Image (cartoon, helix red, strand yellow):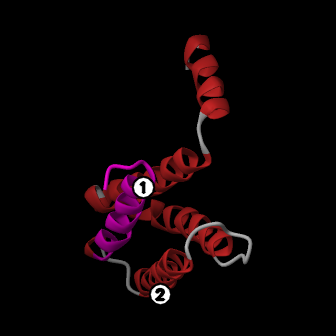
Amino acid sequence: MTHAAQVYGKVAKQVATPRETEADKLLFAAQQLASVRDEWESKKFDLAPALLNNRKLWTVLMASVTRPENPLPAQLRQNVANIGIFVMKQTVEVMDDPKPEKLGSLITINRELAAGLLGRA
């Protein structure tokens, strides 16, 4: 990585809003999962780390939306928590029976939530 790219990356992190940061992490996790799905034969061994990253991300999101001091409307917080529960269940299902076609819902959820956070939904 060039020095200019490193500097840009540091500045981008400093000026990004929390919503943008969350969206970036969701998109990164979606891309990891999509890469495994799309190149299954050569990347299926990357499935466990990609699922772990996604699960950690959703654990943080769920913890955040269930805090009483979270400023989001209660219904929205409940919806995100419910989606998080689905993500966890789907993750276990994929781990129990790994198949590339089972990753689609996780990828779509991450991308759609990121789009909403970025105001693109």
Please tell me whether mark 2 sits on a helix, a strand or a loop.
helix
User: In the figure, is residue 16 to the left or right of 101?
Assistant: right
- For the N terminus, the image quarter is top right
Residue 34 within the segment the image draws in magenta:
no
- For the C terminus, the image quarter is bottom left
User: In the figure, is residue 55 to the left or right of 37?
Assistant: right
Residue 111 within the segment the image draws in magenta:
yes
Which percent across, then down, holds residue 45?
Answer: 45, 63
The quadrant where residue 106 appears:
bottom left
What secondary structure characterizes most of the magenta part? helix
Q: What stretch is highlighted in magenta?
A: 102-121
Of labels 1 and 2, earlier in sequence is: 2
Residue where numbered disc 1 is placed: 114
Look at the picture and state if 28 lies above or below 100. above
Local packing at callout 1 (Cα closer than 10 Å; few below 14, some 14-19, many 20+) is: many
Task: Kindly identify the amino acid type of the residue bearing the numbered disc 2.
Answer: Lys
Which percent across, then down, holds residue 68?
Answer: 73, 78
Which percent across, then down, holds residue 111?
Answer: 36, 58
Which percent across, then down, holds residue 56?
Answer: 62, 67
Task: Kindly identify the amino acid type of the residue bearing the numbered disc 1.
Answer: Ala
Residue where numbered disc 2 is placed: 89
